[in-house]
Amino acid sequence: MRKRGTSKQYVCTTPSRKSIQSIKDKVSELTYRSTRYQDLAEVITSLNQALAGWANYFRHGVSKAVFSAVDHHAWGRLMRWTRRKYEGSHRLGMSEMKRRFCGKGWRFAQGKVVFTGASSVTVTRYRYRGSNIPTPWAPKPEAAASGG
């Protein structure tokens, strides 16, 4: 990719569309209507485990925006799942949803279980090492000094 404002090129590694779609499908599977018999804490725990495992695999590189997009999808699915599970004679409004099921801000929580998502995994970028990268073709100093 080209760096903004300059003509410098650099390597940018992001998760592929196929892998992003696979984690979105997994989130949809975990929040499908056939899972409404589960407790909210169980669903949050399974989502956290799936998203954290996927995000740990892709944390090296430029993945922060992708993690946010996946979290947005997961939050929307979890919100719809919760509204359908806990609606009684009337549909739950957003203010009632926040009061009953969200901790600080709009984070889903039940008991001590809090939805963290993929964004809780810190992204570590590759470091530029330049000429510090060892190559198999460079002669080692010990071999040159001993004469062979």
Image: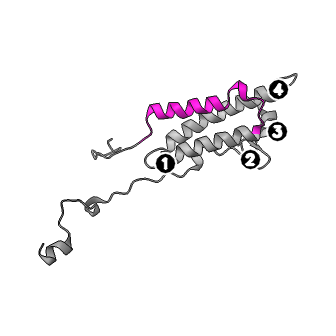
Q: Which residue is mark 1?
A: 59
Residue 64 image offset from top left, x and y in percent: 50, 45
Name the image quarter holding the N terminus.
top left
Which numbered disc, 1 or 3, marks the residue closer to the eye? 1
In this picture, residue 30 sits left or right of residue 2: right
Q: Which residue is mark 4?
A: 87
Q: CA distance from mark 4 to mark 3?
A: 12 Å
Instruction: Identify the element where label 2 is drawn.
Output: strand
Residue 93 image offset from top left, x and y in percent: 79, 29
Residue at position x 71%, y 32% in the image: 79
Q: Which residue is mark 2?
A: 113
Dot placed on the residue nearer the N-terminal end, 2 or 4: 4
Name the image quarter holding the C terminus.
bottom left
Q: Viewer-proximal residue, 52 or 97?
A: 52
- Residue 31 shown in magenta: yes
Residue at position x 63%, y 44% in the image: 49
Residue interval drawn in magenta: 14-40
Q: Is residue 104 visible?
A: no
Dot placed on the residue nearer the N-terminal end, 4 or 1: 1
Going by the numbered disc 4, the residue's amino acid type is: Glu
Going by the numbered disc 1, the residue's amino acid type is: Arg
Q: CA distance from mark 1 to mark 2?
A: 23 Å
Q: Is residue 41 visible?
A: yes
- Looking at the magenta stretch, what is its main secondary structure? helix
Residue 115 image offset from top left, x and y in percent: 68, 43
Dot placed on the residue nearer the N-terminal end, 3 or 2: 3
Q: Which residue is mark 3?
A: 100
Disc 4: CA contacts within 10 A as few (<14), some (14-19) or many (>=20): few
Which numbered disc, 2 or 4, marks the residue closer to the eye? 2
